[in-house]
Image (tube, grey):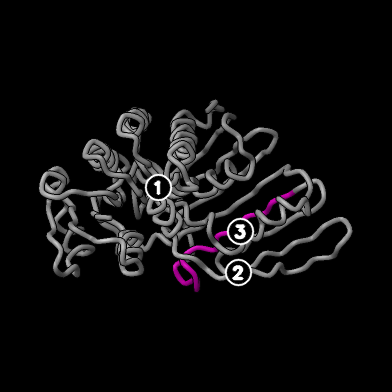
Amino acid sequence: MKVAILGAAHPHVDYALEEVAHRDELELVAAAEPDPTMRGQFLGPLTGVPVYADFAELLAAHDVDVALVAGIYARRAEATLLALDAGAHVLADKPLCTSTAELEAISAAAQRAGRHVSIVFEKRFYPATIALRRLLADGVLGDLALVASTGPHKLRQAQRPGWFLDPVRYGGIAADLPIHDIDLVLALTGATSGVVAALTGNARPADHPGFDDHVALLMRAGDVAATIEASWLGPEAADVHGHYRMRVTGSEGTAELDWAYHRLRVTTHDRPAWDEPLGEPVRPAAYFFDAVLRGEEPVISTAAGLLATRVALTAQRSAERGGELLTW
């Protein structure tokens, strides 16, 4: 199976490189990134692999079975559409795209091509998340009622490229950072419709004028209400990039996930608090290649990725309208 990188503006290009290194069935055949700085930073270390400045040029020169899309956010839709039209499956870093129009075009192209578009929502595969889903399936927490998550990230602004702080090329914080937890809420509830509202702001305008650095999101999915808070205000001196946490409240108990410190704390009405045993970590993109190599649909399916993206883009639109409650 031939793999190519279409866009390399983030260390998450390693999603593909890790799998190629672990699997004899995969071959990295080429990589492309239009921005010369990003191309040098993320693709410069590649040896024995042709590197292009143009997505279409790469796809014209190589047969590609899977394209990893991890470029500048505003160019990810372009790379995804070109890959689908060339007959390749797409494995994408989040966000998949920055507008609803792009999302609709990707949905149509994926259906037309009969190919998968999967977004690497790696929080699904963290050991604490897997343990939580086991507890929910076993009924330990009862019926799910509330989800509350927090996701502070270090901005490390001096290390960020100019495009990242440009709202047009970045696409907006509500469409970016909350999407992992949006996907988890959708996966936990099975909901396919609901409402969402979001508020964004800029706490450090002198450092990055015009760039919103925090968001608070309210979402209803089926009968479950969720609050998701995320920011680029993570303390730079913290010992982790982001202290990501989630509290899940059910009719029979509560579970608190601390992804940064690999812990799942559980309490129920009839049992005092305990730390649930966790399994071993897995590679973030392993699920995708496990599935496509077997000719199966990845567990993070095209429909799942498109829905999470739609909710996130709707949240961004809500923020631009001052927090208006919108349906999805």
Q: Residue 148's spot in the image, x, y percent? A: 64, 49
Quadrant for the N terminus, please: bottom left
Seen at 46% across and 49% down, the residue is 177
Q: Of discs 3 and 1, which sits in the foreground?
A: 1
Q: Which residue is mark 2?
A: 279
**What's the mark number on residue 79?**
none
Mark 3 is surrounded, within 10 Å at the Cα level, by few (under 14), some (14 to 19) or many (20 or more) other residues, namely: some
Q: Which residue is mark 3?
A: 130
Q: Which residue is mark 1?
A: 295
Q: Of discs 2 and 1, which sits in the foreground?
A: 1
Which comes sooner in the sequence, label 3 or label 1? 3
Q: Residue 224's spot in the image, x, y percent? A: 68, 38
Q: Quadrant of residue 283?
A: bottom left
Residue 248 sits above or below residue 277 on the image? above
Q: Principal SS element in the magenta part? A: loop
Badge 1 element: loop
Callout 2 amino acid: Gly
Give me the C-alpha separation between circle 3 and circle 2: 8 Å
Give me the C-alpha separation between circle 3 and circle 1: 24 Å
Q: Residue 277's spot in the image, x, y percent? A: 68, 70
Give me the C-alpha separation between circle 2 and circle 1: 27 Å
Callout 3 amino acid: Ile
Callout 1 amino acid: Gly
Q: Are marks 3 and 2 in contact (CB under 8 Å)?
A: yes
In the figure, is residue 208 to the left or right of 250?
left
Q: Residue furthest front?
A: 294
Badge 3 element: helix
